[in-house]
Amino acid sequence: MSWLSLEDLLSEKTGSEPTSAVILKAQSTKKQNEWGNLQLLSLNDVICSADDVYSFRSVSTRPNFIGKGRHRAAIQHLTLTNIPHENLDSCIICIEFADPGWDWVFTHHIAGVITQYGGPNSHIAVRCAEFGIPAVLGCGQRLFNSVLNARQVEVDCDGETIEVVC
């Protein structure tokens, strides 16, 4: 249902029930597939002109480290469409961007946070500092994707490094 618009639902209101359900399911599947295809596109983080859509260079970024010490834990990738039902305790969670809507993760005893976007003054930085949770914020697309391919990482906040363990 989350893939359907109000217009989709209202347009099928007059049809017979079995037919309407089949049509709505097909529309939902089509929109979900379109969304999946759009996720394969990569765009520049900042678009200033039409040229930035057709060609750009991916630059390396320097992540912001919040906290102290070395921390090793399993990775749990969270997205708006992939929120696992298992316990997040003792995991380092990976989120592309962490706005205040992700505050619920602090109800778990997470081991750390890694974000693709964000900085030292972001909401998530303040919350991690408040709870004493180590964080690597704004690590960029390359490093974030390499972390997502790992099962476990070690974050060294003092040395400002992230190491893929396995």
Image (cartoon, rainbow, N blue to C red):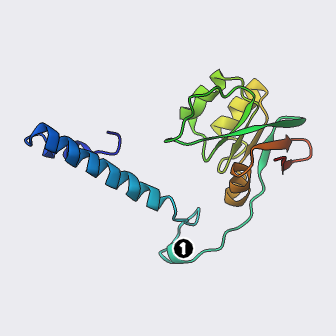
Q: Return the residue nearer the eye: 97 or 70.
A: 70
> Which structural element holds mark 1?
helix
Q: Position of residue 70 (x, y in %)?
A: 89, 37
Circle 1: residue type = Asp
Q: Return the residue nearer the eye: 166 or 10.
A: 166
- Which residue shows up at 7% across the image and 41% down it? 14
What is the quadrant of residue 79 in the picture?
Answer: top right
Q: Position of residue 131 (x, y in %)?
A: 74, 24
Q: Is residue 27 left or right of residue 20?
A: right
Q: Return the residue nearer the eye: 19 or 148.
A: 19
- Which residue shows up at 66% across the image and 23% down it? 108
What is the quadrant of residue 6 in the picture?
Answer: top left
Residue corresponding to mark 1: 52
Q: Residue furthest front?
A: 18
Q: Is residue 85 left or right of residue 32?
A: right
Few, some or many residues within 10 Å of mark 1 (<14, 14–19, 20+): some
Question: Vertically, is 89 above or below 27?
Answer: above
Q: Position of residue 31 (x, y in %)?
A: 34, 53
Q: Position of residue 89 (x, y in %)?
A: 71, 25
* Quarter of the rendering occupied by the N terminus: top left
Question: Vertically, is 138 above or below 46?
Answer: above
Q: How many marks?
A: 1
Q: Is residue 11 left or right of residue 40?
A: left
Q: Is residue 137 left or right of residue 22?
A: right
Question: Vertically, is 145 above or below 49?
Answer: above
- Which residue shows up at 66% across the image and 47% down it? 118
